[in-house]
Image (tube, rainbow, N blue to C red):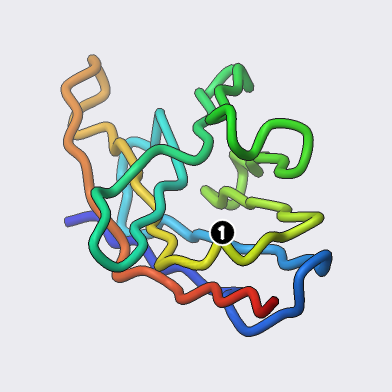
Amino acid sequence: QGRVVESGGGLVQAGGSLRLSCVASGSVFGVNFMGWYRQAPGKQRELVASITTGGSTNYADFVKGRFTISRDNAKNTVYLQMNSLKPEDTAVYYCNVEFRATAWGRTYNIWGQGTQVTVSS
């Protein structure tokens, strides 16, 4: 069974930066899609950024130009560099990973436990 662990969250002031890391482990056949989501109190979980195996990226409008997603396929790790943080970025950030269940393409998804990001005014 695949496992996903996030790290790098913390408390920063507005305008500051954080770098989140997400490590996928327990994979026999590797991983495909890796993405970052966030959920603020009282709100639905929303996509922040995602990246495919080939490196194609997708960003939510509210982070475009401020956040950068990247991955290290050899380490099965995805990163989220967050710059120019705003108080409205405060949320629990979750990593989602699509694992390959077979060598021929069957997959399953695993969520991490989340890491708290708090941006003060």
* Residue at x 55% of width, y 59% of height: 88
Q: Position of residue 117 (x, y in %)?
A: 54, 73
Nearest the camera: 50 or 45? 45
Residue drawn 41% across the image and 30% down it: 33
Disc 1: CA contacts within 10 A as few (<14), some (14-19) or many (>=20): many
Residue 58 drawn at (x, y percent): 55, 23
Which residue in the protein does label 1 denote? 89
| Residue 97 left/right relative to 12 | left
Residue 11 found in image quarter: bottom right
Q: Quadrant of residue 31?
A: top left
> At x 31% / y 62%, what residue is drawn?
112
Q: Along the horizontal axis of the image, is 72 left or right of 109?
A: right
Vertical arrangement, residue 42 with respect to residue 27, above or below:
below
Q: Say which element carries label 1.
A: helix
Q: Quadrant of the C terminus?
A: bottom right
Q: Quadrant of the N terminus?
A: bottom left
Which residue type does callout 1 highlight?
Answer: Asp
Residue 76 percent across, percent down from the top left = 52, 48
- Residue farthest front in this picture: 121
Residue 53 vs 121, above or below: the answer is above
Residue depicted at 19% across the width and 34% down the height: 101
Q: Nearer the viewer, residue 30 or 71?
A: 71
Residue 108 locus on image (x, y percent): 17, 36
